[in-house]
């Protein structure tokens, strides 16, 4: 390897290390603050390492609000929405990528246009619809799992992401499967989805993170403590005047972040396996 190549590699690695340090710094600061007393958290200039580790912040934060219930609610909502987005996204993406019907491309363009509509624009219509459904059945109205899950079961971004992956699968493979007696759904389930694991893992991660960290919608459609989610629970540590109990707030933020970190590690492994399988197939 020439000197120029070695120098280029060193520069790239230094830039990547610097970028990684910038990205991980807020997370490290959150952990550091979670181990400080309230007085030390407000000390200026700030200190990275606490003089005395306040491990009790985690126990106090866990007991300050019904977090077990919040975790259960967030887990149900995030998992249900993730599975829903994967199911609806895979079916719609398969139709837009593999089927031939009049107006397909125009319909797909219109569907993608829905991504341009801000989520805030749909809040009031969705709220009114759920309020009306609640008069028919409380399970379909506000302050229910249905209200937290139903509006997010389909995603234009998910359809776009999966469609781009499905387009890379050769038509000859589909023709051979159909000649062997495999139907459309069988081809989707047995061949398309296993070959699209990287895209599915990416969509699952985005869907889970987006709904686990959702704050505005759960705050609007829930009014009982039994239906609140973990992000609403963090409000317990913010006073009405805006003053926060920083040590407890950061401790709660740490254990609220753990499921997302665990899922990321799991999906990362699946992603690498999917890339390896794609390389072998090619």
Image (cartoon, grey):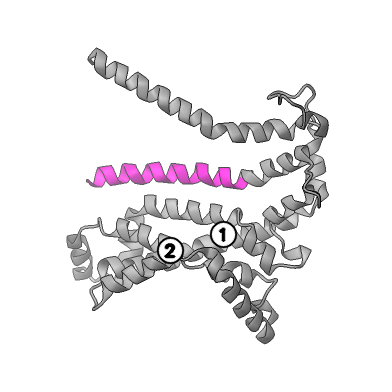
With 116 as the anchor, is 101 left or right in this view? Answer: left
Q: CA distance from mark 2 to mark 1?
A: 25 Å
- Nearer to the camera, 189 or 199: 199
Magenta residues, start to end? 259-282
Residue 269 x, y percent position in the rendering: 45, 42
Residue 185 appearing in the image? no
Res. 195 image quadrant: bottom left
Residue designated by label 1 = 79
Which secondary structure is most common in the magenta stretch? helix
Which residue lies at the image location 35% right of the left edge and 71% below the top edge?
A: 110
In the figure, 236 relative to 138: above or below? Answer: above
Point 79% across, 41% down: residue = 245
Residue 195 is left or right of residue 237, and the answer is left
Residue 277 drawn in magenta: yes
Local packing at callout 1 (Cα closer than 10 Å; few below 14, some 14-19, many 20+) is: some
Give coordinates of residue 238: x percent, y percent: 77, 48
- Image depth: mark 2 or mark 1 in front: 2
- Relative height, residue 119 to residue 62 (above, below): below
Q: Is residue 251 above or below residue 165?
A: above
Q: Report helix, strand or loop for mark 1.
A: helix
Q: Position of residue 163 (x, y in %)?
A: 32, 61
Regarding residue 117, the answer to whether it shows in the image is yes
Q: Which residue is mark 2?
A: 116
Q: Position of residue 59 (x, y in %)?
A: 80, 41
Q: Is residue 216 magenta?
A: no
């Amino acid at each position: 390897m020439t000197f120029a190549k070695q120098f280029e590699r060193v520069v790239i690695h230094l830039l990547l290390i610097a970028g990684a340090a910038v990205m991980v710094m807020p997370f490290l600061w959150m952990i550091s603050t979670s181990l400080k007393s309230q007085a030390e958290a407000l000390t200026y200039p700030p200190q990275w390492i606490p003089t005395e580790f306040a491990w009790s912040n985690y126990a106090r934060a866990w007991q300050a609000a019904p977090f077990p219930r919040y975790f259960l609610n967030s887990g149900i909502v995030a998992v249900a929405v993730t599975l829903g987005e994967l199911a609806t996204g895979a079916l719609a993406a398969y139709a837009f990528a593999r089927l031939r019907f009049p107006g397909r491309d125009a319909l797909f363009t219109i569907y993608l246009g829905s991504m341009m509509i801000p989520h805030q624009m749909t809040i009031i219509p969705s709220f009114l619809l759920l309020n009306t459904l609640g008069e028919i059945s409380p399970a379909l109205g506000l302050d229910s799992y249905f209200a937290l899950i139903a509006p997010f079961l389909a995603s234009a971004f998910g359809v776009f992401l999966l469609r781009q992956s499905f387009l890379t699968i050769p038509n000859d493979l589909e023709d051979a499967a159909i000649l062997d007696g495999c139907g459309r759904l069988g081809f989707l389930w047995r061949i398309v989805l296993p070959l699209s694991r990287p895209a599915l893992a990416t969509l699952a991660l985005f869907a889970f993170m987006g709904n686990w960290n959702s704050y505005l919608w759960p705050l609007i459609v829930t009014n009982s403590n039994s239906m609140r989610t973990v992000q609403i629970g963090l409000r317990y540590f913010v006073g009405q005047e805006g003053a926060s109990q920083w040590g407890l707030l950061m401790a709660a933020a740490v254990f609220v972040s753990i499921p997302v970190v665990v899922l990321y590690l799991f999906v990362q492994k699946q992603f690498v396996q999917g890339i390896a399988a794609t390389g072998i197939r090619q």
